[in-house]
Image: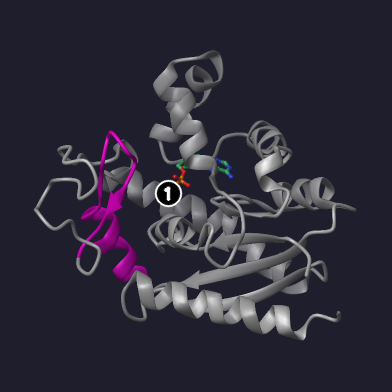
Amino acid sequence: MHPTCLILFGAPGSGKGTQAKLLAGRCVKGPHISTGDILREHVQRGDDLGFGVAAIMASGQLVPDELVSRLVRERIGRPDCRNGFILDGYPRTVPQAKLLAGMLDGRGFDCVVIHLKVDYNKVIARLSGRRLCPQCGALYSVAPNAPTISEVCDYDGARLMIRDDDREEVVRERLETYAKQTLPLLTYFREEPGCRFVEVDGTAGGPHTVVKEICAQLEKIRRSEPG
Ligand code: AMP
């Protein structure tokens, strides 16, 4: 069995981050790589890269393809990605998908794209009710992914906050950006012979139901592989 490059694809609020955290080390051997998290770390550190992307991120638009792809190339080249990895939030444009194909070329990964399908209205409800732990990065949403105690992180007790780009006007911009720049990728993935493409209902039950479905789909793909 080859190592898996799992691409979680879906609208903002479709649950990519939650699913990636549940999947990492479970049915994909390897780390969860979120380009949003990597970029936010640079912004928090206040380094040159973070300074350059902060305004773009705060407005809900996309940072340049070459920049984010350089970060991904560096990250997936590290030893912990040898046995596989999960991409959350990358690729987000067709040029990024082509750059990723170049990075993976000849490295022996099986590429699987999981499209987390969600209802637009549910996405809006999830994003506007979403809370972030400023200490550990855990994301909470409306039930069934609400924190046990309202506004408090289950893991470390920190007071939850609203992510800057989860504010209503930015959510609208993020969804527009998704429709314009990211949705065309669906056609690309469906037609791309190098990647297996699977659709999963991202709102069927809670996060644990969805992760079970993704693992079942991955098993099915692995069993159908020659060798
Ligand atoms: P996320 O946490 O994935 O929603 O990403 C937060 C923000 O980071 C996005 O709204 C973009 O501004 C930026 N970002 C994350 N991933 C990418 C990407 N693959 N391409 C361009 N911008 C990205």
Within the magenta stretch, is there residue 74?
no
Kindly indicate the quadrant of the structure image that contains residue 15.
bottom left
- Residue at 40% across / 23% down in the picture? 44
Residue 117 x, y percent position in the rendering: 47, 73
Whether ligand 1 has any atom under 8 Å from the Cβ at mark 1 is answered as yes
Up the image or down, 140 lies above or below 125; here it is above
Q: Please tell me in which quadrant of the rendered image residue 48 appears.
A: top right
- Seen at 62% across and 76% down, the residue is 218
Q: Which residue is mark 1?
A: 174
Question: Relative to residue 154, is residue 79 drawn left or right?
Answer: right
Query: In the figure, is residue 74 to the left or right of 158?
Result: right
Coordinates of residue 138 in the picture (x, y in percent): 32, 47
Q: Residues within 10 Å of mark 1 (few under 14, many from 20)?
A: many
Q: How many marks?
A: 1
104 left or right, relative to 177: right
Residue 119 visible in the picture? no
* Residue pictured at 67% horizontal, 74% vertical: 197
- Residues drawn in magenta: 119-142
Vertical comparison of 143 with 170: above or below: below
- Residue placed most toward the observer, 139 or 55: 139
Q: Residue furthest left?
A: 149
Quadrant of residue 137 within the rendered picture? top left
Q: Position of residue 47 (x, y in %)?
A: 50, 14
Callout 1, which amino acid? Arg
Front residue of 72/192: it is: 72
User: Which quarter of the figure is the N terminus placed in?
Assistant: bottom right
Picture quarter with the C terminus: bottom right
- Counting from the top left corner in percent of width and height, residue 29 is at 62, 58
Is residue 140 inside the magenta stretch? yes
